[in-house]
Image (cartoon, grey):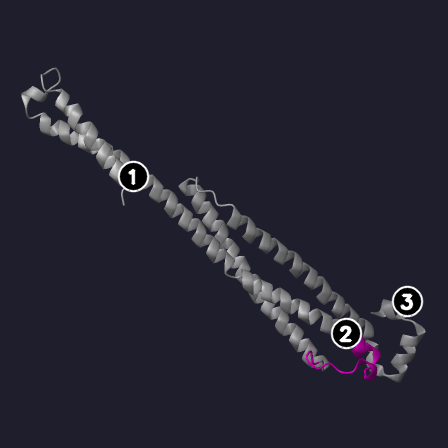
């Protein structure tokens, strides 16, 4: 602030400070405005990263993952959900702080004072903060819209995992449906000597077990 007054301030600003002492805080309020602008840039970058994460994970769900890989993915999404919630709370905090600053400066966002009636410092502060406030509000709304994304992603990953497990279970069931009739027929026919391998009625085993296997496996695969 001292450097600004001694090296940057023009004579007109210095003269206005003599006429209205509130202008002494001109550069201090400017630095506060720069702080908020830099904070908005950081928030904008963070929001862009969050939106990219949400879009990328919604568009890319690999169903051919091992159980350990699924677990790793879900842990990543859960940690992201925690970060999202923390970021959302910070956005609420930033908005509350900005509203407090506006109240202390006597700035009404909905009904701002006539700039021509304000000292130089308050005129510039009002212009800066009236620009910052809507941007921060829009960023907070975008953050609120993203707050449910991690939970949705976790649900999507869990759903794909369930579908993958169900498909595996179906394949095992089809395999069992094919094998079970064969073993059942073999067990029944083994009680008669005529159906043993090399005997006259051994062909009955194949004539019975193969159609039963096809029927049971086909019903399980394509039936309701």
Q: Position of residue 25 (x, y in %)?
A: 80, 76
The residue lying toward the viewer, choosing from 50 and 175, is 175
From this view, report whether residue 221 is shown above or below residue 5.
Answer: above
**Closer mark to the observer between disc 2 and disc 3:** 2
Question: Bounds of the magenta span?
Answer: 108-124
Q: Quadrant of residue 68?
A: top left
Q: CA distance from mark 1 to mark 3?
A: 83 Å
What residue did someone put label 2 on? 127
Considering every residue shown, the one lying at the far right of the view is 11
Q: CA distance from mark 2 to mark 3?
A: 24 Å
Quarter containing the C terminus: top left
Q: Residues within 10 Å of mark 2 (few under 14, many from 20)?
A: some
Q: Say what secondary structure mark 3 lies in.
A: helix
Q: Say what secondary structure mark 1 lies in.
A: helix
Picture residue at 63% right of the left edge, 67% below the top: 138
Q: Quadrant of residue 197?
A: top left
What residue did someone put label 3 on? 7
**Closer mark to the observer between disc 1 and disc 3:** 1
The residue lying toward the viewer, choosing from 153 and 68, is 153
The residue lying toward the viewer, choosing from 164 and 32, is 164
What residue did someone put label 1 on? 221
Q: Residues within 10 Å of mark 1 (few under 14, many from 20)?
A: some
Pick whichever of labels 2 and 3 is earlier in the sequence: 3
Q: Residues within 10 Å of mark 3 (few under 14, many from 20)?
A: few
Picture residue at 79% right of the left edge, 79% below the top: 122
């Amino acid at each position: 602030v001292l450097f600004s007054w001694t090296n940057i301030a023009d004579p007109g600003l210095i003269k206005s400070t003599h006429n209205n002492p509130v202008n002494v805080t001109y550069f201090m309020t400017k630095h506060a405005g720069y702080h908020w602008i830099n904070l908005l840039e950081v928030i904008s970058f963070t929001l862009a990263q969050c939106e990219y994460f949400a879009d990328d994970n919604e568009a890319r769900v690999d169903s051919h993952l091992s159980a350990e890989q699924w677990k790793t993915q879900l842990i990543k999404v859960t940690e992201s959900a925690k970060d999202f919630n923390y970021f959302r709370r910070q956005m609420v905090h930033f908005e509350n702080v900005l509203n407090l600053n506006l109240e202390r400066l006597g700035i009404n966002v909905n009904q701002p004072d006539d700039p021509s009636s304000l000292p130089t410092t308050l005129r510039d502060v009002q212009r800066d903060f009236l620009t910052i406030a809507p941007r921060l509000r829009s960023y907070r709304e975008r953050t609120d819209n993203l707050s449910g994304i991690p939970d949705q992603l976790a649900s999507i990953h869990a759903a794909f995992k369930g579908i993958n497990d169900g498909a595996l279970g179906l394949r095992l069931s089809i395999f069992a449906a094919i094998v079970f009739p064969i073993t059942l027929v073999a067990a029944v026919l083994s009680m008669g000597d005529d159906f043993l391998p090399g005997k006259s009625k051994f062909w009955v085993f194949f004539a019975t077990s193969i159609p039963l296997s096809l029927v049971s496996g086909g019903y399980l695969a394509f039936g309701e």
